Image (cartoon, rainbow, N blue to C red):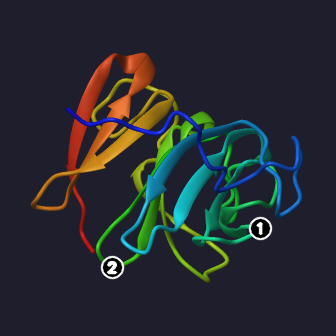
Amino acid sequence: MNEYNNEGVIVAGENGKGDQLNQLNSPTFIFVDKEQSVYISDHHNHRVMKWRRGAKQGRIVAGGNGERSNLNQLSSPAGVIVDDLGQIYVADSSNHRVMRWCEGKEEGEIVVGGNGEGSQSNQLDYPCGLSFDDEQNLYVSDRLNHRIQKFEIIL
């Protein structure tokens, strides 16, 4: 049986709700990479932040340009995951799509959805959770369609 110390250590945030680089506003999903950097979907700031281990503030790695549907924007991001190439996948929930961002780029690209809200196989309805299998297929929790979809991602 594993036991844990019941006193947590804050690794991101701690400076109250806000939109500065040392603040978060409704952090929703996280992903921790091999270097223990934490990727955070900062839901109400419409961005994904990356906090390196021991950092006092994060960096915006996706979105952060207001809540819209342009390729440099997100709307209520949810699930976030990073592949073996360091590409960041974001469930862009209110835009009904999954975006892929390369760190350092100004814009992302739509990899799943982006065809409006709906229940067709090429549509999503408030996607939230993301996961990869061993073959790098992307699984998407398509929340309001009450289903999980699997996609083969072309790199």
Say left or right for 148 vs 105.
left
Percent position of residue 95, x then y = 59, 40
Lower sequence index among marks 1 and 2: 1
Q: Nearer the viewer, residue 33 or 129?
A: 33
Q: Amino acid at mark 2?
A: Leu
Asked if residue 114 can be seen in this view, the reply is no
Q: Nearer the viewer, residue 58 or 71?
A: 58
Q: Residue furthest left?
A: 135
Percent position of residue 112, x then y = 38, 50
Q: Is residue 139 above or below residue 66?
A: above
Which of the numbered marks, if any, corresponds to residue 85? 2
Instruction: Identify the image quadrant of the N terminus.
Output: top left
Task: Write down the residue under mark 1.
Answer: 57
Q: Judging from the image, what secondary structure is the residue with disc 2 in? A: loop
Percent position of residue 34, x then y = 36, 71
Asked if residue 20 can be seen in this view, the reply is yes
- Could you say which quadrant of the image residue 147 lies in? top left
